[in-house]
Image: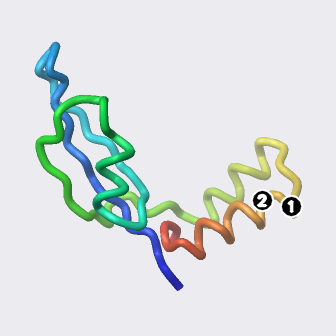
Amino acid sequence: MNNMKVYKVYLEDTVSEDCTIAYVPSFSKESAIEYVQGNGEIIAIKETNDYLISESKLFDTLRSAGYKESETLVITRALNQIGITN
């Protein structure tokens, strides 16, 4: 199984000089960089684990929002298979 990683990308807005952080799920660092291109200068990028999504909380939230059980299972299982839920 080829799990995604999540990259924490620090971007500098060249106009306001503010720094923003984007969490980008991606199969590679290069793909994460491509995803944020045009949104500011990349200051730093690193792999992170401080984003993990709770599968049970996501399931409950989707059910509360009116998703059917089958739809909820597809979404939660897909995220689990790519490695970004716990």
Q: Residue at x 79, y 52 (%)?
A: 63
Q: Secondary structure at mark 2?
A: helix
**Residue 16 versus residue 58 in the image, above or below:** above
Would residue 72 appear left or right of 35 to someone viewing this image? right
Foreground residue among 65 and 8: 8
* Relative image position of residue 21 (x, y in whole percent): 26, 40
Marks 2 & 1, CB-CB < 8 Å contact: yes
Return the x and y of residue 5 as percentages of the image width and height: 38, 67
Spot the residue most to the bottom: 1
Query: Would residue 11 be found to the left or right of residue 38 on screen?
Result: left
- The quarter of the picture where residue 76 lies is bottom right
Which residue is painted at 77% across and 59% down in the image? 72
Residue 73 location in percent, x, y? 77, 66
Numbered badge on residue 69: 1
Which amino acid, mark 1? Answer: Glu
Local packing at callout 2 (Cα closer than 10 Å; few below 14, some 14-19, many 20+) is some
Q: Residue, x 32% and y 61% (percent of image)?
A: 50
Q: For the residue carrying disc 1, how many other residues have a C-alpha within 10 Å: few (<14), some (14-19), or many (20+)?
A: few
Distance from disc 2 to disc 1, alpha carbons, whole Å, reads: 5 Å
Q: Which residue is mark 2?
A: 72
Colour scheme: rainbow
Up-down relation of residue 37 to residue 13 (above or below) = below
Q: Position of residue 20 (x, y in %)?
A: 23, 33
At numbered mark 1, what does the secondary structure look like: helix, strand or loop? helix
Number of numbered markers: 2
Tell me, for residue 83, which label it has, or none: none
Relative placement, left or right, of 16 versus 72 is left
Residue 77 falls left or right of residue 30: right
11 shown above or below 70: above
Residue at left 34%, top 47%?
Answer: 34
**Amino acid type, label 2:** Thr
Quadrant in the rendering for residue 31: bottom left
